[in-house]
Image (tube, rainbow, N blue to C red):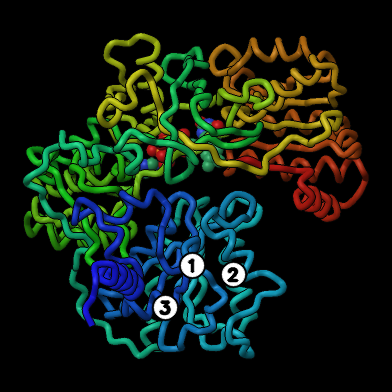
Amino acid sequence: AQLDTLDIIVLAAILVGTVAYFTKGKYWGVTKDPYANAFSNANGLKAGKTRNIVEKMEESGKNCVIFYGSQTGTAEDYASRLAKEGKSRFGLETMVADLEDYDFDNLDEIPSDKLVMFVLATYGEGEPTDNAVDFYEFITGDDVSFSQGADPPLGNLNYVAFGLGNNTYEHYNSMVRNVNKALEKLGANRIGEAGEGDDGAGTMEEDFLAWKDPMWAALAEKMGLEEREAVYEPIFSIVEREGLTKDSHEVYLGEPNKMHLEGTAKGPFNAHNPYIAPIAESKELFSVKDRNCLHLEVDISGSNLSYQTGDHIAVWPTNAGQEVDQFLSILGLEDKKDTVISVKALEPTAKVPFPTPTTYDAIIRYHLEICAPVSRQFLGTLAAFAPNEATKAEMAKLGSDKDYFQDKISKNHYNIARTLSVVSNGQKWTNVPFSAFIEGLTKLQPRYYSISSSSLVQPKKISITAVVENQLIPGRADPFKGVATNYLLALKQKQNGDPNPEAFGLTYELNGPRNKYDGIHVPVHVRHSNFKLPSDPSKPIILIGPGTGVAPFRGFVQERAKQAESGENVGRTLLFFGCRKQNEDFMYKSEWEDYKNALGDKFELITAFSREGPKKVYVQHRLKERAQEVNELLEKKAYLYVCGDAANMAREVNTVLAQIISEQRGIPEAKAEEIVKNMRATNQYQEDVW
Ligand code: FAD
């Protein structure tokens, strides 16, 4: 029979549909740029991707998946390092996976010749990281059930676990501990010990390195793996795009995603998609020469962003020009800084951490933590590409000798470019595949700030209170300078009319990619927190926030002052604030007086100036002096809030609180400690510490 035109059209449509079906749409996300990676199109939306890990491992030929629960990028980084090492030393077919991207009810279908690794950071008050919340709830849930319903449910599952935590927090490494317990309960087989890294002691990297060697040994034995000579294999290919220049419209010059590139950025604004917010106002809060504390007002009225008093704002920083230049220079890339390149993952499960095509300059300036502490293991990897034998030997020594590394590199706060330069005596490192840096450095992370305004008072303007990180390092000529805070300082200088804005000699591309941040803009998003005022304003509150720890409490007190002015019944509000000297770093000094006028006796500011008297006085001392009143307020169910330094202050406040309760109520300390624990559990005692 003859086919008429309509038949042909129908058949063609069916054919197209069938191809689409069998290729799972793979050929349909066609983009103009054959080298473009998913990131540039996806903007966090991972259309058409499977959430079935068993299927994913099967189709990509993997036998080891490394899941990460990461908030600041470190856990993700460690996961990548494990993946690389597993592949290069043991020939494992590894893949790294974001916990958020998969479902877990078929973990029981992973066969026993495959392996699952978990690298899990604990965040804040013993919470899972944002991307691990669903997994955590699933695996530790009372009614967890799996597809096959075997007994024990995870009897086939072999796993490895490492946790990232901070011993200064109450719930140290609770994420990895609880997940480990849950997996054991479900019958899974752990290989090696569940490792724990401690950021509080500053030993995270060394804890990780010390954990992983015995883990690999146990793993090799259990799975019958043969170790081989590790050779570096790049994960990303870098292709120069001759037809493109940095002015080509499809080239990313630091824009975070495709919408930003095309000028169509819109919400939802989140950790994948910042809002380029105008800074409405900025000023200095300290009146002393060598220390700075910034107050910024970020205008979110042009966005659909909202916040609540006590939330956090994330600032997306830019690296300083001098740091970018030093990095380009030591790699011999100065002349290529604007060369357009496409970066492509050489295997399907790896993700390029920024959109491409782009330039070296944009990657280094906007996407990599080039100033962060250097990883000792990474130096070992780079040794192979050293410009001469002496440098190679030195790099190998740094990579393998913990104390030597500490003494030469860590102690001086050197970053990667500085390290390479010091070790090679300035000789250029032109042999390192650029992929190694994309793999070996963390992607540039947003920095969080406790919002220092009240959403009731200024719903569309977010205040930030940030102390500028500028530390003298013994034995090093120049001070160490933090990434985000110096960038913010330069923005403030520009806003206040400085024609050459800088921060301690550092300059920034304040106008952003393609001048998109001109007119004083900063990329931000908002992270909601559980650090919240009681819903009933008549409840008394006790606020303890020395230094920048006072940030959220400015918001709290601002809110209560407003409530009092509107005739609401506001409870007693005690604020313990501390700093060095009244006339140097007493932030918001005159504002507190305004709030006092609004709140009257309801508000009291209790100060501790540590460097004014013969003895150092801190907020915890003042708290103790007020033992009776503090206890009475707590008995009236006052909420107690602590913000700021996690390492010392928050801990001491906890101890002093138990002492106060014990003494005032005439009960043993152990009992008082129980009460304090219980206050935490019921949110009567909340912390926002870092
Ligand atoms: P970074 O460059 O990130 O350096 C920070 C620290 O890392 C340095 O001090 C140093 O100890 C270490 N470090 C970095 N590079 C190296 C290196 N090469 N070698 C050795 N050590 C290194 N801060 C505020 O001022 N106000 C707030 O209200 C506030 N709220 C916060 C709320 C939360 C929930 C969190 C998590 C943090 C908060 N912070 C706040 C801290 C803030 O997020 C930043 O960490 C801080 O501003 C420093 O950022 P930075 O980029 O300037 O410094």
What is the secondary structure assignment of the residue under circle 3?
helix
Q: CA distance from mark 3 to mark 1?
A: 11 Å
Q: Quadrant of ligand 1?
A: top left
Residue to which mark 2 is pinned: 179
Residue to which mark 1 is pinned: 102
Q: Is mark 1 within 8 Å of ligand 1?
A: no
Using the rendered view, name the quadrant where residue 630 is placed: top right
Say if mark 3 contacts mark 1, CB within 8 Å: no
Q: Residue at x 17, y 53 (%)?
A: 434
In the rendered structure, the answer to whether residue 431 lies left or right of residue 253 reads left
Using the rendered view, name the quadrant where residue 182 is placed: bottom right
Residue 312: in sight, yes or no? Answer: yes
**What amino acid is found at the position of numbered circle 3 in the picture?**
Glu
Q: How far across and down, in percent of the image, does residue 2 sit?
A: 21, 79
Q: Nearer the viewer, mark 2 or mark 3?
A: 3
What is the secondary structure assignment of the residue under circle 2?
helix
Q: Residue at x 63, y 28 (%)?
A: 550
The numbered mark, 1 or 2, whose residue comes first in the sequence reads: 1
**What amino acid is found at the position of numbered circle 1 in the picture?**
Tyr
Residue to which mark 3 is pinned: 55
Q: Residue at x 67, y 23 (%)?
A: 608
Quadrant location, the N terminus: bottom left
**What amino acid is found at the position of numbered circle 2 in the picture?**
Val
